[in-house]
Image: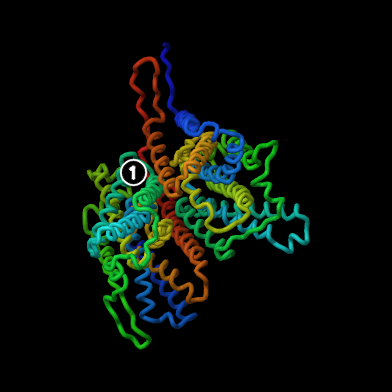
Amino acid sequence: MSRLRNSRLGTFVGRQESVLLLILLAYGLLVGTVNPTFYKLDNLFQIIRASAGTMILAMGALVVLASGGIDVSFTAVAIFGGYATVRIMMASGIDNILFAFALSGIFGMVLGATNALVIHRFRLQTLIATLGTQSIFVGVMTLIFGTKFVPVGDMPDSIVWFGTEPMLTLTMPGGAARLTWFVVPMILMIVLTWFLLNRTLIGRTVYAMGSSREATERAGAALWKTQAFIYMYVGMLAGFMGIVYTAHVRSLNPISLVGDELFVIAAVVLGGAKLTGGVGTVSGTVLGVLIITTLQTTLILIGLSSSWMRFFVGGILLISVSIMAIRTNRENLRNLIFHSE
Amino acid sequence: MQPRTIHLTKLFLLLSAFVIVALLIYGMFGSRFYNTRNLISMGFQVGEFAFLCMAMAIAMLTGGIDLSIVSNMNLAGILAAYVLTNEALLAGTSVGTVLLLAVTVALVSGLAGGILNGLIIAKIGVHSVLTTIGTMMLFAGFGMILTGGRGVVGFPDAFSYVGNGTLLGIPFPFLLMLLFFAAVGFLLKRSRWGRSLYLYGSNPIASKFSGINNAGTIVTTYALAGLLTGISALIMISRTNSARVGYGESYLLQAIVVSVMGTMDPHGGSGRFSGILVSVILLQLLSSAFTRLGITPFARGLVYGSILLLIIIAYETLAGRSVTIGKERPPRAAGRPVDSM
């Protein structure tokens, strides 16, 4: 459907992003008016720090959504990668942050390859297949590595360092603002994903596949290769996120994270990606994640308990997808396309 | 021996799996498992879950999915629990009136949630996955705002009959389940709504142009799913004597497992409703056997995830073929859907 509108795609997505930016600014203004302490550089840095993990996962989710699939197993992959890596580092005594990223990334790629294999070989619906593998991954992790909580004292030093050592400290009149190292992988992953989606053949194939699988296959693209790439890439990002998450909370509960995948998907969809594939941008996703993280971190500043968070995210998601759907339906009607979605 | 041809329908495969599992459990536990007391206890446990499965199954028949069932159930349960624990109401009126009011509140709440899903999907044209992710957060968020995450406990004794009572020695929730299986099954097979639902599920455009009110079909289907969820809420809060956000989150995956195993095609339009009943009982047998074997929740997730994938793969590769016993003949090729979501 979206390929019929290719000429207008640019302006359409552009509009979605400007709306998001406006929402973000308006909300910032609201929070700042209610609570003037919000206007501090440290708060901005805190939002960036808090969004790092979600951002990395969202980049992966964007690639899957652009290809017309939906993955709900990436949080399980992230916790698998993070927990397995920390336990291996604790057991082996290897204490190096690059090793942690490499190992967790490899775990993620292996699990991602499993997803790709199951989905492609048996042509399963991606949602149902990844719901299955999500439980399988968590189950396998607990069978191999157990369910023991890792407190901050047992955490490898390099990971604690990575989560606490400031990369950049700005001294302001109101106090010092610190940016930790783990924003580096976040920025790298955003740039990498943007490059892959917009400047490489595989990225264009991902979008093409999301628009029409059949046309893409007839154009000569090897769908299984694309699919293997997509799910391994998502897995790798999830593996990286597992380490970023561990560094952020500095302790590790193996039953955390799973369940949060819906917030990540909500952020990506808020950013303009469509469940039916072919549409979605990196900049929209970045804004979507920032809106959701800002909401998560600032509700307390405007005097609402964190209980309101899910309610707001759900509401915003529904309103935003409804507006997008109404717009698409109008265009479809004009083009005599009768199928909704 | 006379050659006999057996058509491998999904229902046939499901029934075969049921017999194998039932015999395996007999082999492992014998009459320690198959005794009156254990069967009655299983009859109680299956109640609330069966209603969630029915809700998921009819949503799947439309080619959609309802991810909001568990949070809709919890919200309905919480609202009913507030009625049941209201001191002023209990002091002012008879227990019977309070019970009737609580039942009404749960059913109306579930129904309203379902209608909201249906309206967003049918009237606005948002994909069912996104709609129900959004409403799932909305319902859970609303429950969270109401309760602050705490449980609502302590109901009148008479209310415990809904989830714990027996009629002629048979668990009341089990009887209720059979009643609704018969009623919904009858509606699907014999009513105008049921036939439109199957037609919409297999081809929404054909159904639109044959003069069927597609939006009406969708709204009634999700409304019925919501109503069934409301009934499961009543059984759930009666059985546990409490209501809180986040109860029974593992039911979501299990309800999808039951629906897919129970012959529903996730692409919509085909599935035997009687398969859901067999599938629910099969999963309950497994679940009770796991409890006896002392299997952890994570390992259970692993098993349910694996069952989900194996069942889909078995259906995709085997269903639709025929085997001939007594004479060698190559099986007929299976037609399978190419589309993946």
Residue A8 seen anywhere in this rendered image of the structure: no
From the viewer's perspective, is B67 left or right of A71?
A: right
In this view, the residue in front, B74 or A222, is B74
Q: Which quarter of the picture shows residue B335? A: top left
Q: Residues within 10 Å of mark 1 (few under 14, many from 20)?
A: many
Residue at 66% across / 37% down in the picture?
B170
Marked residue chain, label 1: A
Image coordinates for residue A174, horizontal then vertical, percent: 38, 86
Look at the picture and state if A324 lies above or below A176. above
Secondary element under disc 1, as helix, strand or loop, is helix
Residue B31 seen anywhere in this rendered image of the structure: yes
From the viewer's perspective, is A124 left or right of A113?
A: right
Residue on which disc 1 sits:
A119
Image coordinates for residue B283, horizontal then vertical, percent: 50, 39
Residue at 52% across / 71% down in the picture?
A305
Look at the picture and state if A4 lies above or below A154. above
In this view, the residue in front, B182 or A22, is B182
Image coordinates for residue A81, horizontal then vertical, percent: 31, 56
What colouring does the structure picture have? rainbow
